[in-house]
Image (spheres, rainbow, N blue to C red):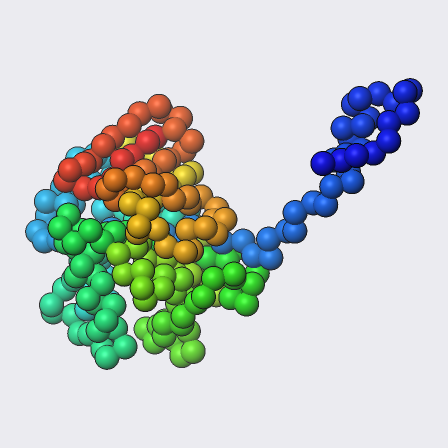
Amino acid sequence: MCRLPVPKAVPVAFLLLSCGSASRAPAAQAFSLELDHFYLVVPPPLANVAAALREAGLVLDSEVDQHEGEGTASIGAFFENTYLELLWVDSSVAVDSAHRSALSDFVRAATWRHSGASPFGIALHFLAGSEADLPVPTRRDPAPHLGPNIFYLLLRQPEESLAADIFVMPPGRAATSWLPKYQSRRPDLFAHPMGVHRLTRLVVHGPPTNRPHAADLTLRLVRFEPAERSYLTVEFDDRQQKRVRDLRPVLPILFEY
């Protein structure tokens, strides 16, 4: 509490200003992390899941991206500043020794209704700072498909196997660095019938016992809130249309736009 002596002639407003200036300002955060993209691990059949998103008014890419070495595959829905991946375990895709344990996480996430695991992955990228500035433990996951000495920065800890996967993209690989060019080349993938353009907020809901340590970081466009069950609130364009589309129970996603 500020206890400055107050001369009778000094207005109260000046006292409040003086108290504020005498207080020590909080230290600036040494880093800034922003949402890069997000994924949802889905069980087969993919056609049912994709149909739910298309019916909601999203355009999905028909081209499947196979993640060699990881045993998974995905398709995407693209927006101006991020994208959503539908990701599944694909037995036809090779798994290397470095990703066998991670594949178990994907299998558990795909059965989220019964396993209690979060089916979500949250990718981030640095706006400022670096790995050394983060106040949480990190692990490096090599990404040889992107090039030598390139890795993802894993923020989810081994004991947090039921939590949402949280990781940081390699430097120079932010989605915002290539999405504008991709939109110019494939504008059809960005022309969503529901009329949305930019993600303005992503809320990850889930049981408090599944909350990862990285959820305590200040993350641009992302926040975590407690809930009985896992689901996402995906907000577009600051809710200009004032509409809501709830895809539960087919998919654990709530769109606000």
Badge count: 0
Where residue 53 sits: x, y (%)?
Answer: 20, 40
Judged left or right of residue 255, residue 239 is right
Q: Which quarter of the rendering shows the N terminus? A: top right
In front of the other: 27 or 125:
27
In front of the other: 168 or 66:
168
Where residue 196 sits: x, y (%)?
Answer: 34, 35
The answer to which quarter of the image holds residue 256 is top left
Judged left or right of residue 145, residue 16 is right
Q: Residue at x 80, y 28 (%)?
A: 15
In front of the other: 34 or 16:
16
Q: Residue at x 38, y 44 (%)?
A: 224
Q: Residue at x 22, y 53 (%)?
A: 117
Q: Identify the residue at the far left of this view.
A: 45
Residue 210 seen in render: yes
Q: Is residue 107 above or below residue 20?
A: below
Judged left or right of residue 180, residue 128 is right
Where residue 130 sits: x, y (%)?
Answer: 54, 64
Judged left or right of residue 41, residue 128 is right
In front of the other: 17 or 244:
17
Residue 73 seen in render: no
Q: Is residue 131 above or below residue 235?
A: below
Q: Is residue 39 above or below residue 237?
A: below
The answer to which quarter of the image holds residue 155 is bottom left
Q: Which quarter of the rendering shows the C terminus? A: top left
Q: Residue at x 76, y 28 (%)?
A: 16
